[in-house]
């Protein structure tokens, strides 16, 4: 696996992976950026949601669980001192649908977070990674 990241201007960078899709990274205007991309630490949180979300959709499909909507929020608390790593990260999985089986949702999320999601398993070694489910 290989990616490339190109400096655009100031704190604006563009990353590209094998799919050839550009991902813009930048920092906030207040931190000296142009605001033309996602902050790299926010992007890291997004990768937890994306990786585990893909697992969960696949697992629920195999379990024949149909949902109307599925969203994930991820909140991270960083250390005050540099390198300002994440200390605590909470992932909240929100599901909408009719008569959703809570036990199957919990099992799908557990399998992703504890077995299949490479990103979550890697991050869990560096931060306290917790998760919960909400059925809306």
Image (spheres, rainbow, N blue to C red):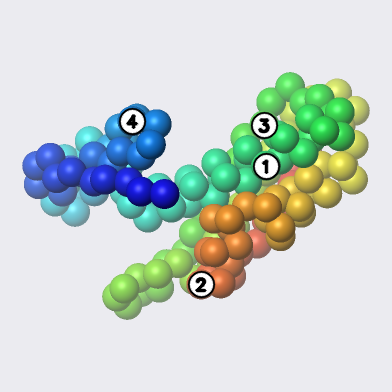
**Picture quadrant where residue 81 is located:** bottom left
Mark 4 nearby-residue class (10 Å; few <14, some 14–19, many ≥20)? few
Q: Earlier in the sequence, mark 4 or mark 3?
A: 4
x then y, percent, for residue 49: 56, 45
Q: Which quadrant is the C terminus positioned in?
A: top right
Give how far apart the Cα atoms at labels 1 and 3 are: 13 Å
Residue shown at 54% from the left, 55% from the top:
119
- Observer-nearest of 7 and 88: 7
Residue ID for mark 2: 126
x then y, percent, for residue 127: 53, 70
Residue shown at 33% from the left, 52% from the top:
40
* Residue 4 seen: yes
Q: Determine whether label 2 and label 1 are within 8 Å by CB.
A: no
Mark 2 nearby-residue class (10 Å; few <14, some 14–19, many ≥20)? few
Report the disc number at residue 55: 1
Q: Earlier in the sequence, mark 2 or mark 3?
A: 3
Residue ID for mark 3: 70
x then y, percent, for residue 120: 58, 57
Give how far apart the Cα atoms at labels 1 and 4 are: 23 Å
Q: Earlier in the sequence, mark 1 or mark 4?
A: 4
x then y, percent, for residue 87: 49, 71
Report the disc number at residue 20: 4
Q: Determine whether label 4 and label 3 are within 8 Å by CB.
A: no
Mark 1, secondary structure of its residue: helix
Residue mark closest to the camera, 2 vs 4? 4
């Amino acid at each position: 696996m290989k990616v490339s990241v190109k400096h655009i201007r100031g704190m604006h960078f563009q990353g590209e992976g094998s799919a050839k899709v550009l991902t813009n990274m930048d920092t906030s205007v207040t931190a000296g950026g142009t605001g033309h991309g996602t902050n790299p630490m926010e992007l890291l949180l997004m990768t937890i949601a994306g990786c585990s979300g893909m697992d969960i959709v696949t697992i629920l499909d195999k379990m024949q669980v149909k949902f109307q909507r599925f969203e994930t929020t991820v909140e991270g608390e960083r250390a005050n001192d540099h390198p300002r790593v994440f200390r605590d990260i909470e992932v909240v999985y929100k599901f909408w649908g009719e008569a959703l089986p809570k036990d199957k949702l919990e099992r799908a999320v557990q399998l992703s977070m504890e077995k299949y999601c490479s990103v979550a398993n890697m991050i869990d070694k560096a931060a306290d990674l917790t998760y919960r489910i909400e059925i809306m």
